[in-house]
Amino acid sequence: MKEYYDAIVVGAGPGGSSAAYHMAQQGLNVALFEKGNKPGDKNVYGGTIYRRSTQEAFPGFWEEAPLERTVITDEVWFLEHDSAVKMGFTGLEFKKPPYNKFTALRSKFDNWLAEQAKDVGAELYTNTLVTDLLYQKGFLASGKRIKGVKLYDGTQIKAGVVILAEGVNAPLAHQAGLRKKLPTNAFTLYTCETLALSPKTIEERFELESGEGATIGFAGFPTSGSSGKGGLWTNHDNLSIIVGGRLNEMVSKQLNPHHMLERFKSHPLIKRLLHGADSLEYKAYMIPKGGYSLMPKLFSDGVLIVGDAAIMISGRRGTDLAMISGKKAAETVVQAKAREDFSKKSLANYSHKLNQQFFMKDIKSKTKEKDYYLKHPDADYLVNSLMNEIAYEFFTEDLKEQNEKQKLLFSKVYQKQLPIKSFVDLIQGINHWRFG
Ligand SMILES: Cc1cc2nc3c(=O)[nH]c(=O)nc-3n(C[C@H](O)[C@H](O)[C@H](O)COP(=O)(O)OP(=O)(O)OC[C@H]3O[C@@H](n4cnc5c(N)ncnc54)[C@H](O)[C@@H]3O)c2cc1C
């Protein structure tokens, strides 16, 4: 380990490894510190890797990256206690290059990303917790200039710039005064489980051929009447499932995350998907809700923040945003290095680069959505149960005349709540549910 690096990256998640890769590729001296035994150790869950956006940071990644299945089927299930309104799409085009998206297990995927950074010269140090930032003398708390990091064993390492890619909790970003304490409603808490199932059973159960994958998003029932959602991903020889809700509602309604997952698994239609699958891993995670007003200052003298640490998340999607923000931070640092100037002014271009990205508009629009669910926490439940009641009535074989049946269907809409409210709930839901 050297005493000085051009850049230090804290955290070998997708954001940190992408930043380290793009800086080392341009010849900078880079150290990448990861507190886990290996990159991805802290992220055991499975999820979606989006082809189009991920290739912005790692062109052609699908040729080599450890991906589980090529997603051809996306479904959304609006669940009630004994029924589901299902919506879905299967596109066989998605099985061909350049593909649409993939399922991946983050423990393998994150490790691969860090290996890419190592291959171009970044130094990866695992089992290495960064505990503090070092500040240049003469800079007061309000204008701290960062000049390096302190490790768990007291070692001090200096650097031109530090990139914070430490994930959702981001204690160092707080320490640097870049991030404020966020309210509980700014987070969702997800419980995740990985369950082993043979590839043959997965393919039969989800109507797939070898190598093909499916994802299912669930709204309504899984979160016990609160806002939130569930998800299922088919991996090669296991399934990943998650259920999560807003942290503030989980606390105020005393919802137990473990019970929520068990309740989801005990739903009669979910049981059929999981039948015979054995639990491999179980963990709980937080995801920032996102929204522009929650984002921290993205840079300051000698420091930049990427990925979840910067609340760079759209829906539940954040892996690709972290990789792109890591790349943009790296480009900014490479330019700053050419000037040998890592001041706030010199790093300001990072913000400009990010504002040109497709996801920033989404993030900027998120505040309104969050406010809606704070006022109407039962909106998801109401719209889901209405859909199921209407579907039951519509598909029930009876001896009613068509006019009578139509009246009955309309009466269902009016009985639940004002139809305009159901319509607004649905529109908000379409924005909020974004599964896959
Ligand atoms: C259940 C769940 C499902 C999700 N599904 C999807 C999905 O399907 N698609 C998608 O795009 N996104 C998904 N996300 C979001 C995605 O996981 C995050 O947006 C993404 O991981 C952010 O990457 P990151 O590099 O910013 O942070 P992280 O992935 O959190 O990585 C941070 C890394 O920093 C390390 N670290 C932290 N502090 C220190 C320190 N002080 N010293 C050294 N190392 C440190 C951690 O160990 C970790 O390895 C999901 C998230 C969850 C919780």
Image: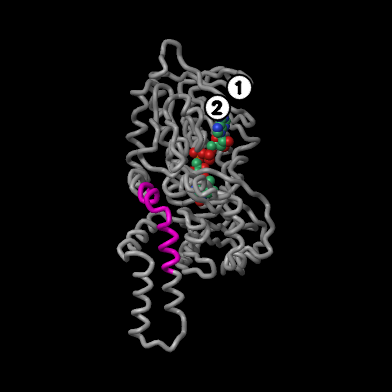
* Residue indicated by mark 1: 1
SS of the residue at dot 1? loop
Which three-letter amino acid code belongs to the residue tagged 1?
A: Met
Which three-letter amino acid code belongs to the residue tagged 2?
A: Ala
Give the residue drawn at x 35%, y 74%. 411
* Residue indicated by mark 2: 31
Q: Where 175 falls versus 80 (above or below)? A: above
Q: Is residue 209 magenta?
A: no
Q: Where 292 falls versus 31 (above or below)? A: below
**291 and 3: which one is in front?**
291
**337 and 141: which one is in front?**
141
Residues at badges 1 and 2 in contact (C-beta under 8 Å)? yes
Whether residue 149 sits left or right of residue 428 in the image: it is: right
Whether residue 366 sits left or right of residue 191 in the image: it is: left
Q: The magenta stretch spans which residues?
A: 370-387
Q: Quadrant of residue 340?
A: top left
Dot 2 crowding, Cα within 10 Å, few <14, some 14–19, many 20+? many
Q: Quadrant of residue 269?
A: bottom right
Give the residue drawn at x 50%, y 60%. 218
